[in-house]
Amino acid sequence: MAIRIGCQLNCWPVGPTFDEPLADAIREAGEIGYVGVECNWRMIDVWNDRRAELADLFSASGTVLAALFFGAGSADATAAKQELDDAMRTAAFLESFGADRMMIGGGKATEDEAAFKAVCEHYSELGKRVFEQHGVKACYHLHSGAIACSPAEIARMLELTDPRYWFLCPDSGIMVKEGHDVVELCNASFDRIAYVHFKDWTGNDGWSMLGQGVVDHVGIIAKLRERGYDGWIVSENESRTEGLSPKEQQGADREWFRSQGV
């Protein structure tokens, strides 16, 4: 069993162009010791016809594509169909680079049970298609105000979605902020966890670099190791620490991981 450490390129301003700024971020991520990177699926619009160039960039930097973030969660049939089409295009791109994880975020919070169920059905269908056709696991990433955010909502989503095709990406900082016990979640819902985000929260309204906030990342790593987690833990540094470049911020996170033996 092996934990691999990657980083989300949000710390670098790679959008909206996703061209040379993204290439520079990949190079810097490799220089500070990350072995995988994650980006927004919109990068496909730039790199789909430049796959050989991107493959060379990954090889030279010592990194691989770990996952792409994709937005989906509409209860509207027409919009949901477009999301399915875009998800398939994203999964095909991931497969071509040997990546097998897609993070899914989106969907608006609702108290309408029928709408909630419709989104869960949509998620199961999306997960089934990308897995059966491209071997990619769809992993839900919660955001504040999204379709499933609270502990009860996440539990309900897991109950209503197909466990063969719909997985979870715990974002540690957001989950703690929204009232989750992430260590317990990693134990109780371990079979549904296929990707993990680490983000530290100050306990107020801000984010910090790893090890400087209130999230029990040491406990989360210990639980994942205990359960035999084999997959990515990805730093999504949103601290925007004054005076530090993106490379320095993500470099500090990488050093924290090293201090924990990963």
Image (cartoon, rainbow, N blue to C red):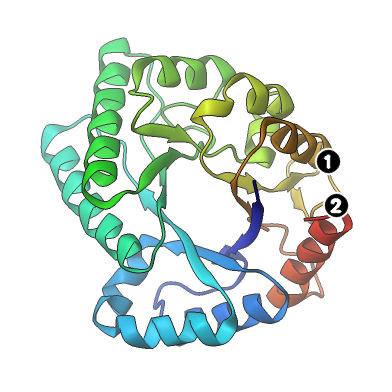
Mark 1–mark 2 distance (CA, rounded to whole Å):
7 Å
- Classify 238 as above or below 139: below
One can see residue 21 in this view: no
Please give the count of numbered marks on the rendered protein.
2
Helix, strand or loop at label 1? It is helix
- The local secondary structure at tag 2 comes to loop
Lower sequence index among marks 1 and 2: 1
* Res. 216 image quadrant: top right
Three-letter amino acid code at the position of disc 1: Val
Asked if the residue under mark 2 is in contact with the one under mark 1, i.e. CB atoms within 8 Å, the reply is: yes
Q: Which quadrant would residue 104 be assigned to in this image? A: top left
* Position of residue 74 in the picture relative to residue 231 (left or right): left
Q: Which residue of the protein is positioned furthest toward the top in this rendering? A: 113
Q: Relative to residue 195, is residue 94 drawn left or right?
A: left
In percent of width and height, residue 15 lies at 45, 72
Residue 223: percent from left, percent from top: 75, 32
Q: Residue at x 59, y 72 (%)?
A: 12
The quadrant holding residue 5 is: bottom right
How far across and down, in percent of the image, does residue 195 sit? 54, 44
Identify which residue is drawn at 23% across, 42% down.
132
User: Amino acid under label 2?
Assistant: Gln
User: Residue at (41%, 26%) from the top-left corner?
Assistant: 109
Disc 1 packing (10 Å; few <14; some 14–19; many ≥20): few
Above or below, 235 against 25 in this view is above
Q: Which residue is mark 2?
A: 260
Q: Which residue is mark 1?
A: 218
Does the rendering let one see residue 125? yes
The crowd level at tag 2 (other Cα within 10 Å; few <14, some 14-19, many 20+) is few
The residue at the point 84 percent across, 45 percent down is 213
Q: Nearer the viewer, residue 156 or 208?
A: 156
Name the spot of residue 11 as percent of width and height, x first.
62, 66
